[in-house]
Image: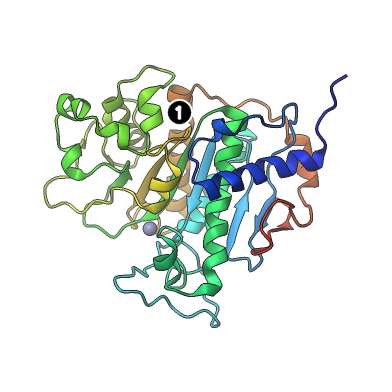
Amino acid sequence: MRRRPSRLLCAVAPIALALVAALAGCGDRAALEPTPKGCPTCGDPGTVITDGAGYVEYTTGDAPLIISAPHGGLLAPPSLPDRSCTGCVTVTDENTEALARRVAEQFLARTGRHVYLVINRLKRAKFDPNRDLLEATGGNAALASSWTTYHFFLEDARYRVTYAATRGLLLDLHGHGHTILRLELGYLLSAADLRLSDQALGASGALAHSSIARLSLQNAGNTPPVALLRGPASLGALLANNGFPSVPSPGDPAPGVGDEYFTGGYITQRHGSASGGTVDAVQIEAFRVGARDTPENLDRYATALVSSALEYLRVHYGWVPTASVGATDRARATRGNVPGIPATPVVRAMRPAA
Ligand SMILES: [Zn+2]
């Protein structure tokens, strides 16, 4: 009779393997097999853990959707100096932490499933995990472990998504102050690339280096790569249909010459599929008035994100929510120190999921 792996092994193995992968710079979780099989409760969906300082926070999930909010934090401990690096951007993306939490709550209410949620709780003036280590911390060594932990949490989420569902999607949530009130979807493709015709863009091979490279090679609906960006079932199309004009999308296929546009940052580059792996990523930059300015608009925008993500996952990943096998384990969503994580930072359970 085959013994089922212990609960401890189930909890440790994905984290340890993800750590090994992170240290090795490995982009493909599937290459980490063998994995512990027959362990439906490994994920402890809904568990909230943080770095020792409580600066970054991670909620484990049981859906192939990862939400990241690196620029919406509100904490500004006086003990931490402001970042002072040359060219550092220190403006907070207002209300994007609240937005990310709303997305997670609405997703759970609609599907019974938890997204993986990774949040920076510090103000951007103190810490910016969407940058490399030096720029993220402004050279403040006290925050190095928080930076490592933020990306470790994303690595762990990617690993768990790959283990549980094979493939998945990361949405990195931001806010912009640009003139045109539209969502800017960043796939690591330049505005000039997006201004190419569908035929020229497809022929350029640019999608193979985008943050949805994996999806462009294989998707459930056999959607052509360029259509993933601005076809009728693109994320931009779905968000526009849900009330939030977006670029690229069928009605707005590319930023115009001179338009301000964010193509995607460090998180999208590192944790999407541009350099391998089975999790794709999209950076979503939202305007403020009408999307991020009031609780009502945050709710409305979160609803659009959840609806669009669910449709995107269904059409392109073939995933629809079913009853979660880990649901009965949410009640025990607290545990002590998690083995397999470096001594610094200490990762610990802070509180059960609400
Ligand atoms: Zn941002």
Of residue 131 and residue 60, the one placed in the foreground of this image is: 131
Seen in the picture, residue 178 relative to 270 is either above or below; the reply is: below
- Residue 26: x and y in percent read 50, 41
Residue 110's quadrant in the figure? top right
- Residue 300: x and y in percent read 44, 46
- Residue 27: x and y in percent read 48, 39
Residue at the spot of label 1: 311
Relative to 216, is 348 on the left or the right? right
Q: Would you say residue 44 is visible in this rendering?
A: no
Of residue 236 and residue 82, the one placed in the foreground of this image is: 82
Furthest toward the top, the residue is: 222
Q: Quadrant of ligand 1?
A: bottom left
Label 1 SS: helix
| Ligand 1 is within 8 Å of the C-beta of the residue at disc 1 | no
Q: Give the amino acid at mark 1.
A: Glu
Seen in the picture, residue 13 relative to 205 is either above or below; the reply is: below
- Residue 68: x and y in percent read 49, 50
Which class describes the residues within 10 Å of circle 1: few (<14), some (14-19), or many (20+)?
some
